Amino acid sequence: MTSPPTPGPDLTDLPDTELLRLDHQVCFSLQAASRAFGGVYREALKDLGLTYPQYLAMMVLWEHGPLPVKMIGERLHLDSGTLSPLLKRLESAGLVRRRRSPEDERSVTVHLTEAGAGLRERALPVPRTILGATGLSVQEVLALQETLGRLTESLSRAG
Amino acid sequence: MTSPPTPGPDLTDLPDTELLRLDHQVCFSLQAASRAFGGVYREALKDLGLTYPQYLAMMVLWEHGPLPVKMIGERLHLDSGTLSPLLKRLESAGLVRRRRSPEDERSVTVHLTEAGAGLRERALPVPRTILGATGLSVQEVLALQETLGRLTESLSRAG
DNA sequence: CATAACTTAATTGTGCACAACCCAATGGTA
DNA sequence: TACCATTGGGTTGTGCACAATTAAGTTATG
């Protein structure tokens, strides 16, 4: 709007101090937003007795039914080092149960208990609460996701 | 997609299933980007022997000189429960030293050692590496920060 | 001066993320 | 058959984030 997108050198001609400032703010803004999300989710999930990562795992199960740990991990991009204790906590809370697959004894299938399935009802209003708290329009949400998607892909390629 | 993008009511008329999907993706995109950033920083900071939060703390000290823990925490939005062990690790790595303030014995001032100050030189190229890895233009970075800033503020107000 | 209220760090406990490792089951191959 | 790489879970260790509590010091107020 204010200035045309420069077709020339993009950022390589900025001084180090400016680069440092910008860079700091990018990752920092991201962390700040994550942290703020965490706070809102903590509040919204308090009554359900779930943390945000636990809520994500429950969402996967609510949506897809019984799944092996591996599949849950792939959907959430979490490895067994994170999921194993998390699922154990969900199990000791009586929301899920884990069972070795008869066909492949290496695989552990996680399925909801009655209590776990019943919790879905109480979790339904959560997304609306969260999205409302963002204060963003749907268009902005979509644009943000698009940018973040490209960002993540670039970073993943670089890492 | 039964209705055109209405300029009026924003999201309150979307069905729960769609809301759930959108919402999921917002926080999820954010987490994915954070994770990807983490990987790139891990790689970039490996030679310096710093983690990303440690790098942030060092940046604050490089920029502002000796500071009490409280001030570092305010800049990074971290509390003492996070900072105390982090700073202790930096101290045992010989990069900083902690000293009770003579004026106010409650306050602990953190200052760089010679090694810590010297590390700045080797950290200078990091921001350029990171920003390059994002694959974003300066305009996009600024727009992203603006959106994230508003998002964070809304979420903080809601939390 | 004495006490209450506030401030600053540190500590403790819970939970998440990730790397590195181990173990058992699987599946292919010689 | 015996061998071996792969796969799926689990465990351990390190480090970050945050809540709640404690301890010590400072300031305000009676």
Image (cartoon, coloured by chain):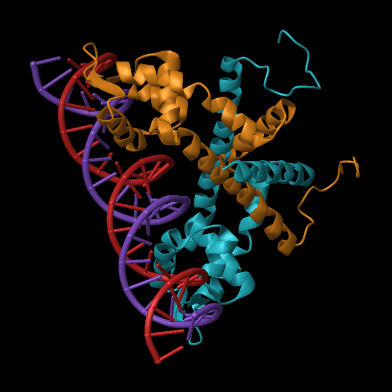
Chain colours: A orange, B cyan, C red, D purple
Residue A62's spot in the image, x, y percent? 42, 17
How many numbered marks does the figure carry? 0
In the image, residue A93 sits, relative to residue C29, either above or below, namely: below
In the image, residue A135 sits, relative to residue B20, either above or below, namely: below
Q: Is residue A156 left or right of residue A42?
A: right
Residue A9's spot in the image, x, y percent? 82, 48
Front residue of B65/B119: it is: B65
Q: Is residue B57 left or right of residue B151?
A: left
Residue A10 seen in the current view: yes
User: Quadrant of residue C14 in the image?
Assistant: top left
Front residue of A19/A133: it is: A133
Front residue of B43/A96: it is: A96
For image coordinates 70% across by 43% down, the residue present is B150
Check the picture and name the quadrant holding the N terminus of chain B: top right
Q: Is residue B20 left or right of residue A107?
A: right
Residue B119's spot in the image, x, y percent? 54, 70
Residue farthest to the top, as pictured: B2
In the image, residue A118 sits, relative to residue B56, either above or below, namely: above
For image coordinates 55% across by 40% down, the residue present is A37
Check the picture and name the quadrant holding the C terminus of chain B: top right
In the image, residue A31 sits, relative to residue B67, either above or below, namely: above
Q: Is residue B81 left or right of residue A139?
A: left
For image coordinates 78% across by 57% down, the residue present is A14
Front residue of A84/D14: it is: A84
Residue A68's spot in the image, x, y percent? 33, 20
